[in-house]
């Protein structure tokens, strides 16, 4: 029983420290965003900033990856990104399908072309 509790402690910490605090902000954002005009200048600016931040994070993960991802060749990372994006476009703009396809391509490429 002790081994099982020790095994799930990192996951509990991830939920308590990573997921829940972020989830509160998501719910508050959902609550306060009702009734906002999507074409309002401030809302358009916030969307643009959020998109730019997301693009920067994706670019950093592709071109300057941390940890084990750095061992995956750049061509594999670029190919997985392209696979995910094309899947997103082909399957009715499904973010879920794009992420799953990109992840499958990344893992397959890492296993095929990565180190040992």
Image: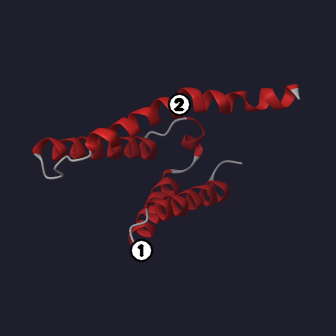
- Quadrant of res 59: top left
Between residues 66 and 71, which one lies in front from this camera angle? 66
Q: Quadrant of the N terminus?
A: top right
Q: Against 64, is 91 above or below?
A: below
Q: Secondary structure at mark 2?
A: helix
Q: Residue at x 68, y 29 (%)?
A: 10
Q: Residue at x 33, y 46 (%)?
A: 55
How many C-alpha atoms fall within 10 Å of the one at disc 1: few (<14), some, or many (≥20)? few
Query: Left or right: where does residue 20 sit relative to residue 108?
Result: left
Residue lying farthest left? Answer: 41
- Expressed as whole percent of the image width and height from the top left, the position of residue 68 reads 60, 39
Q: Against 85, is 36 above or below?
A: above
Between residues 90 and 17, which one lies in front from this camera angle? 17
Give the residue at mark 2. 18
Give the residue at mark 1. 90
Q: Against 2, is 64 above or below?
A: below
Q: How far apart in space, not on screen, are marks 2 and 1 (Cα)?
A: 32 Å
Query: Left or right: where does residue 43 sit relative to residue 76?
Result: left
Q: Secondary structure at mark 1?
A: helix
Dot 2 and dot 1 residues touching (CB under 8 Å) = no
Between residues 83 and 35, which one lies in front from this camera angle? 35
């Amino acid at each position: 029983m002790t081994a099982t509790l020790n095994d799930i402690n990192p996951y509990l910490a991830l939920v308590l420290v990573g997921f829940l605090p972020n989830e509160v902000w998501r719910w508050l954002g959902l609550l306060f965003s009702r009734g906002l005009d999507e074409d309002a200048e401030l809302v358009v600016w916030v969307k643009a900033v959020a998109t730019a931040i997301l693009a920067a994070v994706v670019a950093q993960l592709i071109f300057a990856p941390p940890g084990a991802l750095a061992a995956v060749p750049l061509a594999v990372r670029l190919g997985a990104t392209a696979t995910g994006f094309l899947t997103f476009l082909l399957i009715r703009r499904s973010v879920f399908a794009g992420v799953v396809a990109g992840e499958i391509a990344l893992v397959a490429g890492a296993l095929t072309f990565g180190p040992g």
